[in-house]
């Protein structure tokens, strides 16, 4: 049997030769499902073989973890140093950073862990270079900063493909697709809203994955790729933005051209920065903070006034349980209930449980067993 990579290449070529229409849509769905399965297998193999060598099992800390992803020598270490004051080795040659270097950024009250990882290079997801271990770290991140330099704006596309192949989906919500295997009855499909897929396309993707009987529920629109993702699972949906480094080396006209080029490739404008001179470093911090989405809640000890001076900074959408974990493990184990004042409740001082979702500016009192 041909190697995984050759098999994938063959199928991708076939896909390229086939135009999408009603007659070919089923076939295309099946080929795409095959490719996705092979890629998954390649990634899993690579990760197993890699075994997560030394320096790759980074302990998460802080309120969120951000990774810097980019080719060697684009300035990741320099940026990490500029943002956090960490001493990550900077060098004028490729492959300096062979282990993951963590740094801590404190911004607007949030503690954000930033990871400088070995340069992602073409084929990383398939286990080339040090890519295989790197992918695991990226998949675990809360946000990705895609870093390129002024001379290599086209790297954005290569990096996007690497991330895609590693099961990472950028800047999009997880499609709302539920697939429940059933014992008989074939594939049945229900959907809410407009759907540009027909059941035969879904059937061929499912059958490629040996699912002959299933109930499929789709809310909102979905593509063949979304169905494949739902079938294979383990996809990570992570926010990201592009930063273009070393803008100190080019003039205004060149900066504009790069900005437009990346807008076309990526769909949104990049941040133009210079980690070396410090240009736009505050903007990078703000962008990270805003995209991660934080909110403030205030703690009110039982029968005392709330501490309105020092809010607790937590990710948007956090629950009472998240707050408890942040305060102390014991708070979860010994939790009885909480009272909440603010936008997340109907009545002031409403009693809620651990799964209750908080909103910006909420006040809460946690009652634990003594
Ligand atoms: N001119 C200029 N050089 C930079 C900038 N950022 C990094 N460099 C240089 O680019 C080289 C590679 O940087 P480094 O941080 O080691 O890249 P990494 O491999 O991505 O970690 C070093 O010589 C840095 O001094 C920048 O903003 N402007
Ligand atoms: Mg480096």
Image (cartoon, rainbow, N blue to C red):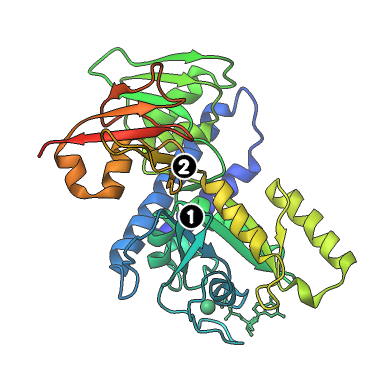
Horizontally, residue 364 falls left or right of residue 288, namely: left
Residue beneath the point at 43% across and 46% down: 311
The residue to which callout 2 is attached is: 296
The disc placed on residue 124 is: none
Q: How crowded is mark 2: few (under 14 residues within 10 Å), some or many (20 or more)?
A: some
The quadrant of the image that shows the N terminus is bottom left
For marks 2 and 1 on the same chain, the one whose residue lies earlier in the sequence: 1
The disc placed on residue 109 is: 1
**Of all residues shown, which one is farthest toward the left?**
370
Task: Determine which quarter of the picture holds residue 260.
Answer: bottom right
Image height check: is 256 above or below 370? below
Image height check: is 270 above or below 278? above
Measure the alpha-carbon separation of dots 2 and 1.
9 Å
Residue beneath the point at 45% across and 51% down: 142
Task: Determine which quarter of the picture holds residue 233.
Answer: top left
Horizontally, residue 314 falls left or right of residue 162, namely: left
Q: Could you tell me if residue 312 is visible in this image?
A: yes
Horizontally, residue 178 falls left or right of residue 276, namely: left
Horizontally, residue 337 falls left or right of residue 45, namely: left
Label pair 2/1, CB-CB below 8 angstroms: yes
């Amino acid at each position: 049997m041909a190697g995984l990579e050759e098999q994938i290449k063959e199928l991708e070529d076939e896909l390229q030769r086939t135009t999408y229409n009603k007659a070919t849509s089923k076939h295309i769905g099946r080929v795409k499902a095959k490719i996705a399965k092979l890629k998954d297998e390649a990634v899993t193999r690579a990760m197993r073989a890699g075994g997560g060598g030394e320096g790759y099992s980074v302990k998460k800390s802080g309120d969120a973890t951000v990774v810097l992803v980019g080719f060697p020598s684009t300035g990741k270490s320099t940026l990490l140093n500029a943002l956090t004051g960490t001493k990550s080795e900077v060098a004028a040659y490729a492959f300096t950073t062979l282990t993951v270097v963590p740094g801590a950024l404190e911004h607007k009250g949030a503690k954000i862990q930033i990871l400088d990882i070995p340069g992602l290079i073409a084929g990383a997801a398939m286990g080339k270079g040090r890519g295989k271990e790197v992918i695991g770290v990226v998949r675990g991140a809360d946000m990705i900063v895609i870093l390129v330099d002024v001379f290599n704006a086209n790297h954005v596309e290569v990096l996007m493909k690497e991330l895609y192949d590693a099961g990472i989906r950028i800047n999009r919500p997880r499609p709302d697709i539920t697939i429940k295997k059933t014992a008989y009855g074939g594939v049945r499909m229900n959907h809410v809203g407009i759907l540009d897929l027909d059941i035969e396309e879904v059937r061929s993707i499912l059958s490629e994955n040996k699912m002959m009987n299933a109930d499929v529920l789709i809310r909102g629109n979905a593509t063949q790729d979304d169905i494949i993702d739902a079938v294979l699972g383990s996809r990570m949906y992570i926010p990201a933005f592009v930063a273009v480094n070393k803008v100190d080396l080019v003039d205004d006209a060149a900066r504009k051209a790069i900005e437009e080029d990346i807008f076309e490739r990526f769909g949104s404008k990049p941040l133009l920065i210079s980690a070396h001179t410090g240009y736009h470093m505050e903007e990078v911090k703000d962008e990270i903070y805003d995209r991660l989405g934080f909110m403030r809640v205030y703690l009110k000890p039982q029968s005392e006034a709330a501490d309105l001076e020092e809010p607790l900074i937590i990710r948007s959408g956090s629950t009472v349980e998240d707050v408890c974990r942040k305060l102390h493990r014991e708070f979860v184990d010994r939790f009885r209930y909480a009272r909440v004042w603010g936008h997340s409740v109907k009545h002031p001082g409403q009693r809620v449980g651990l799964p209750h979702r908080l909103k910006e500016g909420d006040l809460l009192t946690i009652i634990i067993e003594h």
